[in-house]
Image (cartoon, rainbow, N blue to C red):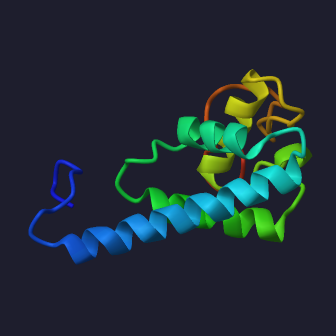
């Protein structure tokens, strides 16, 4: 990849490795979503994921791997409303909620307000 985010024509092997890692991460994340929210089809889960995480973005595989690991450890993460979670999970929950899926949006642990503001650190509290 170049600094602009385009594939590096000088290093196709590196690009292929990154693309394979990204596809694997997307597959793992989509599987976790479909298991947690059976109402979501594979296509709907992938679309919500692409909305929550700009897939072509630099480092998307890392975010998706973190998400899949969190979902494996916390299978109820989309419905529990817990705030201690990866940011991608919060974005995904809001995206899925806006599309009508039965998910629970996390609220600020201090005031209880549910907003579109994304996770603020591991405490789940808004900015001081």
Location of residue 49 by image quarter: top right
Return the x and y of residue 74 as percentages of the image width and height: 84, 64
Q: Is residue 44 left or right of residue 4?
A: right
Return the x and y of residue 9 as percentages of the image width and height: 12, 63
Is 88 above or below relative to 12? Answer: above
Q: Is residue 91 visible?
A: no
Q: Is residue 109 visible?
A: yes
Residue closest to the eye, 74 or 111: 74
Return the x and y of residue 123 as percentages of the image width and height: 71, 53
Is 33 above or below relative to 39? Answer: below
Location of residue 109 by image quarter: top right
Q: Quadrant where the C terminus lies?
A: top right
Q: Is residue 72 left or right of residue 22?
A: right
Is 55 above or below relative to 98? Answer: below
Q: Quadrant where the N terminus lies?
A: bottom left
Residue closest to the eye, 55 or 104: 55
The residue lying at 53 percent from left, 59 percent from top is 63
Q: Is residue 46 left or right of residue 2?
A: right
The number of numbered badges drawn on the structure is: 0
Residue closest to the eye, 108 or 29: 29
The residue lying at 73 percent from left, 38 percent from top is 93
Return the x and y of residue 42 as percentages of the image width and height: 73, 46
The residue lying at 87 percent from left, 45 percent from top is 37
Residue closest to the eye, 79 or 31: 31
């Amino acid at each position: 990849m170049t600094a602009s985010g385009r594939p590096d024509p000088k290093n196709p092997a590196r690009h292929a490795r990154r693309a394979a890692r990204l596809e694997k991460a997307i597959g793992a994340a989509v599987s976790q979503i479909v298991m947690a929210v059976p109402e979501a089809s594979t296509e709907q889960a992938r679309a919500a994921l692409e909305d929550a995480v700009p897939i072509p973005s630099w480092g998307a595989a890392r975010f998706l791997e973190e998400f899949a690991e969190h979902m494996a450890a916390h299978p109820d993460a989309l419905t529990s409303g817990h705030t201690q979670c990866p940011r991608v999970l919060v974005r995904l929950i809001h995206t899925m909620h806006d599309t009508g899926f039965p998910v629970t949006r996390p609220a600020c642990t201090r005031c209880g307000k549910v907003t579109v503001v994304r996770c603020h650190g591991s405490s789940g509290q808004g900015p001081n």
